[in-house]
Image (tube, rainbow, N blue to C red):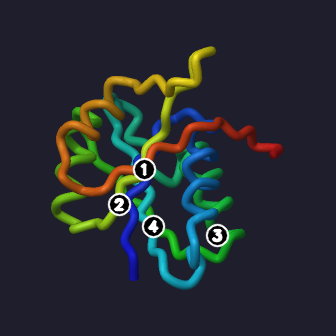
Amino acid sequence: MYEILVPVDRDEPRALSQAETVSELPHSAEEVHVTLLHVFTNNEEGASVNQVGSVREAQERMAEAGIEVDLAEQSGDPAAEILDYADEADVDLICLAGRKRTPAGKVLFGSVTQSVILGTEKAVLVSGREQTPSE
C-alpha cells in the first residue's frame, strides 16, 4: 500500500484540491492509503480533527473515489509537525497545497509548503488548482 500524508489547513478549496489530486493518481482506490493531518496552532476550544470542515470535505471527496482514509491531528508549528509525522509514519509521499498561480504560471508556495519541501527527503506533490465544495 502506498502511504500518502495529506496535511490540510482550514481552507476548504485547498483541501479539496489536495483530495482531487490524490484521487486522480493511478490506481488510487486500490493501492493508496491516505492520512489526512490537521495541525492545530491555537486550539483553546479543544476542537478535534473531526470538527474541521476542510478535513471532512477532503475525507468525503477521497471516500467517494474509494480511497482508504485515516485522520490524524497534531498541535504546534505546522511545518515541523508535518515533517515529524511524515518521518514517524514513514509515508511515501506528502501532498501539499500550492497557494495560487501567478500570471506567468508560476506556483506560489506558502511558508509551510516551502518549509516542508525544503525540510524532507520524501517525495512531495503540490496540488496547484483550488476546488470549491460544489465542484
Per the image, the residue denoted by label 1 is 125
How far is the residue under mark 1 from the one under mark 3?
A: 20 Å
Q: Are marks 4 and 1 in contact (CB under 8 Å)?
A: no
How far is the residue under mark 3 from the one under mark 4?
A: 10 Å
Per the image, the residue denoted by label 4 is 34
How far is the residue under mark 4 from the one under mark 1?
A: 13 Å
What secondary structure is found at the residue carrying circle 2?
strand
Residue 99 position (above or below residue 65)? above
Identify residue type, mark 4.
Val
Residue 109 versus residue 134: which sits nearer the camera?
Answer: 109
Per the image, the residue denoted by label 3 is 63
Q: Are marks 2 and 1 in contact (CB under 8 Å)?
A: yes
Residue 30 versus residue 8: which sits nearer the camera?
Answer: 30
How far is the residue under mark 2 from the one under mark 1?
A: 7 Å
How far is the residue under mark 2 from the one under mark 4?
A: 10 Å
Identify residue type, mark 1.
Leu
Identify residue type, mark 2.
Leu
